[in-house]
Image (tube, rainbow, N blue to C red):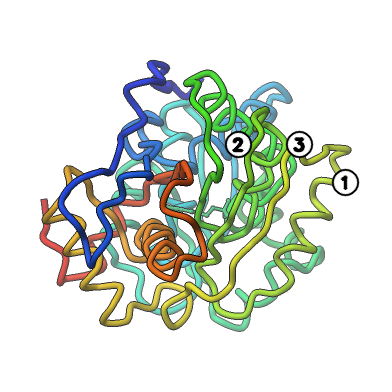
């Protein structure tokens, strides 16, 4: 099994401190998933553990998936696969292939296969998938980003951590890529709270429908009201504007905390901005989930390396 730290209470950190761009975050706490998850800290290990456990139970020894050259998903798949003694194959979108992320993945034994951009666009076509499995398999083909029903089930464990840590949260805030993590939280949270997803993508207005469809296809039901906010993308997926950059550097200078610009920096900046605009009241109890991804900092030279 993928090992995970289980001492929940120490994973929740209050963010109260000297103000960052005018906010002292007195009412905000953070679930530090970046500190747990074994070889793949953050939400990706939760998504993958159920997928890989099901594969292992069926005697499947090889898992294949898709991602970009900076994909946290492929990085985690390589790490978790190595730990479980499974073979992994990563189909990477054309372009740069010698990133720090893929170097880690190769070191952990992932076979990295470059696809041209036009082939990569066919990644959801069954006939193309069959040809990839015929050439590089046999094995289980996992969709890009680990967006599967098993992934939703795996992310329920994040909600269980929040439930068992106790405390009341008016809002639970999480960054959204595919929405798989948000879906697992919606199903697993047992408290009287609202779940807010911060989309890391620009204009991904089909996300709500995709989350709803994945819950329905799994016969799962949201236990809390949830919504996705689409106006905190800072220019688009993996894009960074000056405000986001300044915010991340200011947070890191003032708190015992690292962020990355793709997901967690945008999620916390969204909390900052909603509090600053009084959209969210300053006496609400807010829990932001730090979903990890810190290995991706190496793609941003302006972030101090350590
Ligand atoms: C992948 C990822 C997310 C988004 O998770 P989804 O389940 O795809 O919505 C959020 N934060 C980090 C750090 C990630 O790597």
Give the answer, above or below, for where 162 lies relative to 239. Answer: above
Res. 20 visible in picture: yes
- Mark 3 or 1: in front is 3
Is 204 positioned to the left or the right of 282 in the image?
right
Residue in the picture at 37% in, 46% down:
292
Q: Residues within 10 Å of mark 1 (few under 14, many from 20)?
A: few
| Nearer-the-camera pick, 278 or 118 | 278
Q: Is residue 262 visible?
A: no
Which label is found at residue 217? 1
Q: Residue at x 88, y 38 (%)?
A: 219
| Badge 2 or badge 3: first in the primary sequence | 2
**Mark 2: few/some/many CA within 10 Å (<14, 14-19, 20+):** many
Seen from the viewer's position, the closer of residues 274 and 201 is: 274
Q: In the image, what residue occupies the spot 26% across and 82% down?
A: 242
Comes first in the chain, label 1 or label 2:
2
Q: Which residue is mark 3?
A: 223
x, y percent for residue 141: 67, 49
């Amino acid at each position: 099994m993928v090992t995970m730290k289980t001492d929940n209470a120490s994973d929740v950190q209050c963010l109260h401190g000297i103000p960052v761009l005018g906010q002292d975050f007195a009412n905000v706490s953070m679930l530090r998933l970046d500190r747990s998850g074994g070889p793949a800290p953050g939400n990706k290990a939760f998504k993958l553990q159920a997928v890989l456990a099901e594969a292992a139970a069926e005697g499947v020894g090889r898992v294949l998936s898709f991602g970009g050259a900076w994909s946290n998903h492929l990085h985690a798949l390589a790490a978790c696969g190595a730990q479980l003694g499974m073979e992994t194959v990563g189909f990477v979108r054309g372009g740069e292939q010698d990133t720090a992320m893929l170097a880690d993945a190769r070191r952990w034994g992932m076979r990295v296969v470059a696809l041209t951009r036009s082939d990569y666009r066919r990644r959801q076509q069954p006939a193309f998938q069959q040809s990839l499995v015929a050439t590089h398999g046999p094995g289980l083909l996992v969709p890009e980003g680990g967006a599967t029903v098993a992934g939703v089930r795996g992310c329920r464990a994040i909600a269980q951590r929040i439930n068992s840590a106790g405390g009341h949260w008016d809002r639970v805030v999480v960054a959204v890529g595919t929405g798989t993590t948000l879906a697992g939280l919606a199903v697993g949270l047992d408290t009287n709270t609202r779940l807010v997803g911060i989309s890391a993508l620009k204009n991904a207005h089909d996300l709500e429908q995709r989350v709803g469809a994945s819950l329905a296809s799994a016969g799962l039901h949201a236990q809390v009201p949830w919504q996705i906010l689409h106006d905190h993308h800072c220019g688009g997926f993996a894009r960074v504007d000056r405000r986001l950059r300044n915010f991340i550097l200011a947070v890191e200078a003032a708190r015992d905390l690292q962020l990355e610009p793709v997901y967690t920096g945008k999620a916390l900046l969204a909390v900052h901005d909603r509090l600053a605009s009084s959209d969210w009241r300053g006496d609400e109890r807010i829990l932001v989930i730090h979903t990890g991804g810190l290995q991706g900092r190496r793609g941003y030279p302006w972030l101090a390396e350590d």
